[in-house]
Amino acid sequence: MSVIRKYCCIHAGKCFLDGALLFQSEQEKAKEFLAELYREIKPGYPKFFKMDVLAKAGFLAAELLMKGTEPVDDRKTGLFFANACSCLDTDRHYQDTIGEAYFPSPSVFVYTLPNIVLGEICIRHRIFGENTFFVAPEFPVSQLRRYTEQVFADSGLERALVGWLECEGNTCEVMALLVEKQGEGIEFTDENINRLKR
Amino acid sequence: MKVCIVGDNIVSSLGFTTGENVAAVRRGDSGLRYYADRLEVPEPFVASAVCRERLDEAAERLGVSSEKYTRFERLSIVSVADAVAGKAVDLLSRRTLFVLSTTKGNVELLDEKLKKGFGPERVYLWHTARVIAGFFGNPNEPVVVSNACISGVAALVVAKRWLEIGDYDTVVVVGADVLSKFVISGFQSFKALSPEPCRPFDAARCGLNIGEGAATLVLQREEAPVGRVMVEAGAITNDANHISGPSRTGEGLFRALTAVMQGAETEEIGFLNAHGTATPYNDEMEAIAFERAGLQQVPVYSLKGYFGHTLGAAGVLETIMAAHALKEGFLPVSRGYQQCGVSRPLQMVTEMTECRMRQCIKTVSGFGGCNAAVRLKI
């Protein structure tokens, strides 16, 4: 049975780790809140400020989940995330740069792919395993859980970050889980994932 | 039980069926053209575009009008309809799943001038996927994979897993992307586009060309497949190195190749269909990874000189081409290649060759440091 070792929920204004409130602020705009959360947990990673909001949210969730975990063989960690809006906010931002005033920027364009957040997490934590980004109208709890279990069964992967990373407009809604193929923790079931959502 | 290809289709600049596309590649035709004034992009570019009139005609026959369906959706629907035509596939069944592979879907609708009557929900990829699966009456929520340039092969790996989980008897993988000002300008801003037809792995290569198209693979599990191309192994990895630059050591691709080679000998691999975008760094990275994986003696080709880089369609389209190369026993010429331009010499295919081998590998690499590979067997 796979287990949830740690879990983290982030909304603009509040961040929870393993069900406990880790940080809160008056700030209800996602971008600004994530910057405050960064200052709170001090990852010491200035590249954070170059990221788009989606990558920032995923980066911080991964930071909280991976902190203090014992290292595993770097081939054996994977990332499975989903959201509804892909990277539409950055798409809109980029679209604004190619209208009448035409000044397309590579540093904006690169974030017009939703899996860039997975790349950022892989770079930070030296993760070489499977990294797949799905788009679904709502958190596909059962689909992500069963897919993760299947990857554990067929690929030698032993640990995964799994979750929902939705950032659009000023809001963000993150639920991320650190899941291990076996060990101590909360049973990795649909019921438990739904119960742990904040 | 084996995951087998039971149907396929390619809609590209080179044709509207797999047969047309295979025949065009065998003749050495390229779909790449020079466009000086298209999509309101200020700079000219070379790209591979699907014929508008033929798309209108094919879509019309299916009742897929341009008022109700976007260009992206029409391409996808036309591709799926042909892939399943005459096949024992029940798209209405709960046991059939649609998987959509795309990088940008209907992103062109963000442009006020192109929005027409389409609602704001149409730019969401999950919605686009529902429109496509819904056209065929499929009752399941489609799965959307959006993993940059590896999306197509990643979607194939995902589809294989869902068949192995056992919930579905059939998975329809459709990969698509369309030419847009959004994508062309973005790659131009990266200085990644070649001003002429691209030259993968060549010494004079100077960038990629964007292509558009849709490609569909219909997959099923079979006990004892006869004459089918099977998806033997698949892997997705990351370089953990850079979000927009390929790894200098080919780490992720090397790991993907190592994973799909488990259970196979190098001597059994007839060819490697590389990603081969023709950017200086990508092709060099691939050459390093191929050598590290011990595959430097295996014939290599890239199809980008025929189709351009079709983004979300590429992994599906090129896997279909590889499957047909295995079936028909030929190696396509790596168009645009003349002189070795990578530090590790590769066995580039420079003339059409017969291939009697029964296995091959298809690889892709993309932004975000992602890589994927599949091994096919007939």
Image (cartoon, helix red, strand yellow):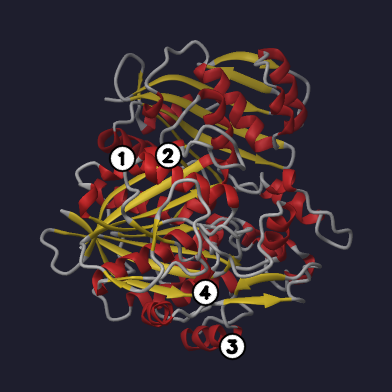
Q: Position of residue B286 (x, y in %)?
A: 46, 47
Verify CB contact (< 8 Å) between mark 4 and mark 2. no
Under tag 1, what secondary structure? Answer: helix
Q: Nearer the viewer, residue B81 or B372?
A: B372
Q: Residues within 10 Å of mark 1 (few under 14, many from 20)?
A: many
A184 to the left or right of B155: left
**Residue B301 falls left or right of residue A36:** left
Q: Amino acid at mark 4?
A: Leu
Badge 4 element: helix
Q: Quadrant of residue A172?
A: top right
Q: Nearer the viewer, mark 4 or mark 2?
A: 2
Determine the CA span between mark 4 and mark 1: 33 Å
Graded by Cα atoms within 10 Å as few (under 14), some (14 to 19) or many (20 or more), the crowding at tag 4 reads many
The chain ID associated with circle 4 is B
Mark number, residue B53: 3
Q: Secondary structure at mark 3?
A: helix
* Numbered circle sitting on residue B237: 2
- Alpha carbon distance from label 4 to label 2: 29 Å
Mark 2 or 3, closer to the camera? 2
Which of the two labelled residues, at mark 3 and mark 4, occupies the earlier sequence position?
3
Decide which of A168, B335 is in the foreground and name it: B335
Q: Identify the chain of the residue marked 1, using the numbered disc in the image.
A: B
Q: CA distance from mark 2 to mark 1?
A: 9 Å
- The chain letter for the residue carrying disc 2 is B
Q: Do tag 2 and tag 1 residues touch (Cβ < 8 Å)? A: yes
Residue B276, relative to residue A82: is it above or below? below
Residue occupied by mark 1: B259
Which label's residue is closer to the chain start, 1 or 3?
Answer: 3
* Pointer 4 residue: B75
